[in-house]
Amino acid sequence: MADIFDKEMRSIVMKKVRTKGNKSTELKLISLFKKYDIKGWRRGYPVKGHPDFVFLQARVAIFVDGCFWHGHDCRNTRPKENEEYWTKKRKCNKKHDQEITEYFRKRGWNVIRVWECELKSVTLPSKLDFLLV
């Protein structure tokens, strides 16, 4: 399907995509933290890589990654228009994610990446079960 916007308008639209406060990602995880009475997390912690949540005492950084933007193929959504650009964009995002994960791990942190699709359920993703202790 062809894009309904010209290049300039598409750029304006894409700039309005929010990186924080997204209801399908970070806000959903906050609601799960509250539901399961998980304490000790901080949001917006000023550190390279900008994890969505940190648990300072446990040295855990949690990144909530949007499936499309970070290259998860759960929906197999790939734009036909400007395909080369989007392929390169997702590849760069994945590389950056790997670099940031390594940055934290070298400093003794555990890094957890939660996919947007894992938050569709009303339960905590199993990779976060350790927080229930």
Image (cartoon, grey):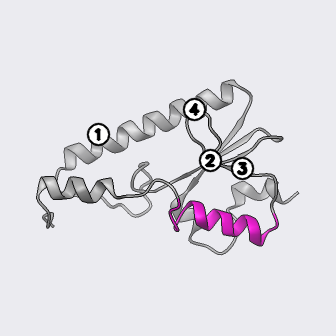
Q: Which residue lies most toward the right here?
A: 133
Question: Image check: 72 left or right of 128?
Answer: left
Observer-nearest residue: 118 or 28? Answer: 28
Callout 3–callout 2 Cβ contact below 8 Å:
yes
Q: Give the range drawn in magenta.
A: 21-37
Q: Residue 110 carries which label?
A: none
- Viewer-nearest of labels 2 and 1? 2
Callout 3–callout 1 Cβ contact below 8 Å:
no
Q: Residue 44 carries which label?
A: 2
Q: How far apart are marks 4 and 1 (CA)?
A: 23 Å
Residue 35 position, x and y percent, is: 76, 72
Q: How far apart are marks 3 and 2 (CA)?
A: 7 Å
- The answer to whether residue 70 is above or below residue 28 is above
Specify few, some or many for label 2: CA neighbours under 10 Å numbering under 14, 14-19, or 20 or more.
few
Please tell me whether residue 26 belongs to the stretch shown in magenta. yes
Q: Which mark is residue 48?
A: 4
- Type of amino acid under label 1: Lys
- Viewer-nearest of labels 4 and 1? 4
Q: Earlier in the sequence, mark 4 or mark 3?
A: 3
Specify few, some or many for label 1: CA neighbours under 10 Å numbering under 14, 14-19, or 20 or more.
few
- The answer to whether residue 108 is above or below residue 88 is above
Please tell me whether residue 54 belongs to the stretch shown in magenta. no
Observer-nearest residue: 6 or 73? Answer: 6
Q: Earlier in the sequence, mark 2 or mark 1?
A: 2
**Mark 3 = which residue?**
42
Residue at image coords 28%, 44%: 87
- Type of amino acid under label 4: Lys
Residue 93 position, x and y percent, is: 41, 40
Q: Earlier in the sequence, mark 4 or mark 1?
A: 4
Residue 131, picture quadrant: bottom right
- Type of amino acid under label 3: Arg
